[in-house]
Amino acid sequence: MLPDVLQDQTATALMYATGPSTPKLGEALAEHHRVLDGVDLAPTQIVATNGTAGGIALVAQLFLEPGDVVICEDLTYWGAVASFRLQGAELRTVPLDEGGLVVEALADLLDQLAREGKRVKLLYTIAACQSPTGSVLDEGRRTAVAELCRRHGIAILQDDTYGEIRFERDRFPRSFLACAPERTIHLGSFSKTIATGLRLGWLATSPEIAAAAAGVRTDLGTTAIIQLLVAEFVRSGQYDAHVAGGAPFYQHKRDLLLQGLQEHCAPWCDWTVPPGGYYLWVTLKQGTVEPFEALAEAEGVSFLAGPHFSPTRVADEGFRLAYGEVAVDDITEGARRLGRALEAAAEKVGASR
Ligand SMILES: Cc1ncc(COP(=O)(O)O)c(C=O)c1O
């Protein structure tokens, strides 16, 4: 593929890819969204970004001024929090339950912010395969969220970094891009489906927002040759086949972990059952994650603890387990060791009473 791209598209491949994206990537991803979600996009509505992280930073740069409010989920992605804060934004949060963002809490928060006279610009949501909880926001909640954002004049920034890694396909409704195209900025990434080192993601949105985002970018685009190689991978259908083909492998890992948690950890914690993605969220039945972390580490088990994901509160009752990158043969043993650490932590809590 590389020699062909270099020979056929030398000028594009080795130059800056300023503006939205190379036309080839724009065309391939517009078609990808048409198949995935039934949305019609022009290639110029696709803006290539430096991963989802770059997309978030670009949107923050485009939308936010000091004092603007961004609403995000609590728990959420720390990199997004950092990007919003860098622009001087104030973060306000809505809680999550097993179905994702709690709509009633969002409605109350929006009313509260209106009373406070705040300028609310964005709702940032990881609506599918939420990180860290793994939840997927269903159709009903999406419609309600879109309606609230419409009423309050807010843009929806959907971070879909993991949203195409699907085990239970019927649990995935159409994206916000399909139900609120006029106000959605959809962020996709090849990081978790091909390789993080590509540093290639995209932003799909209205023609106006896409043009404005391309207009404010100061990075001179992402690597053109990577865009062209990935565009060919997507155009040829190999990308969709690769992602769909990988899903049973990750589902098997998830299932091994669920089984291991049930066998070894159930007395001390609860956990979510993600319908896709690479993560699940564990909640301790008693005690906090901080003293437990060292015990787990001593057993050779590591995870990201709650405070890492919470912009406003301590969130020290839980932690994220990542099964995606753990070798199949290590998962059951990992759960067994986690159980040992949980038991030791519970004994400590008991002894200190
Ligand atoms: C929810 C979420 N968004 C964005 C990113 C950044 O992804 P990318 O490599 O596409 O920049 C990550 C990385 O782990 C993530 O978990």
Image (cartoon, rainbow, N blue to C red):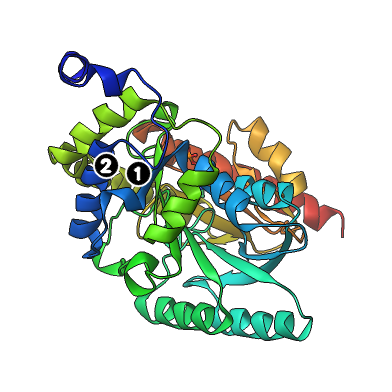
* Residue sitting nearer the eye, 161 or 207: 207
Residue 21 visible in the snapshot: yes
Q: Name the residue located 36 percent from the left edge and 32 percent from the top edge.
A: 329
Residues under labels 2 and 1: Cα distance? 7 Å
Q: Where is residue 314 in the image (x, y as percent from the top left)?
A: 77, 58
Q: Residues within 10 Å of mark 2 (few under 14, many from 20)?
A: some
Dot 1: what SS? helix
Q: Do the residues labelled 2 and 1 touch (CB within 8 Å)?
A: yes
Q: Quadrant of residue 115?
A: bottom right
In which quadrant is the N terminus drawn? Answer: top left
Dot 2: what SS? helix
Q: Name the residue under label 2.
A: 249
Q: Mark 1 and ligand 1: say if the CB distance to the nearest ligand atom is below 8 Å.
A: no
Q: How crowded is mark 1: few (under 14 residues within 10 Å), some or many (20 or more)?
A: many
Q: Name the residue located 42 percent from the left edge and 76 percent from the top edge.
A: 142
Residue 268 visible in the snapshot: no
In which quadrant is the C terminus drawn? Answer: bottom right
Q: Mark 1 points at which residue?
A: 253
Inspect the image, locate mark 2, and give the three-letter code of the amino acid beneath it.
Phe
In this rendering, is residue 100 above or below 216? Answer: below
* Residue sitting nearer the eye, 335 or 123: 123
In the image, farthest residue toward the right: 353
* Residue sitting nearer the eye, 23 or 246: 23
Inspect the image, locate mark 1, and give the three-letter code of the amino acid beneath it.
Lys
Q: In this view, does 301 lie to the left or right of 203?
A: right
Instruction: Tell me how many marks there are.
Output: 2
Q: Name the residue located 56 percent from the left edge and 72 percent from the top edge.
A: 154
Q: In which quarter of the image is residue 190?
A: top left
Q: Where is residue 233 in the image (x, y as percent from the top left)?
A: 20, 33
* Residue sitting nearer the eye, 272 or 128: 128
In this rendering, is residue 48 above or below 7? Answer: below
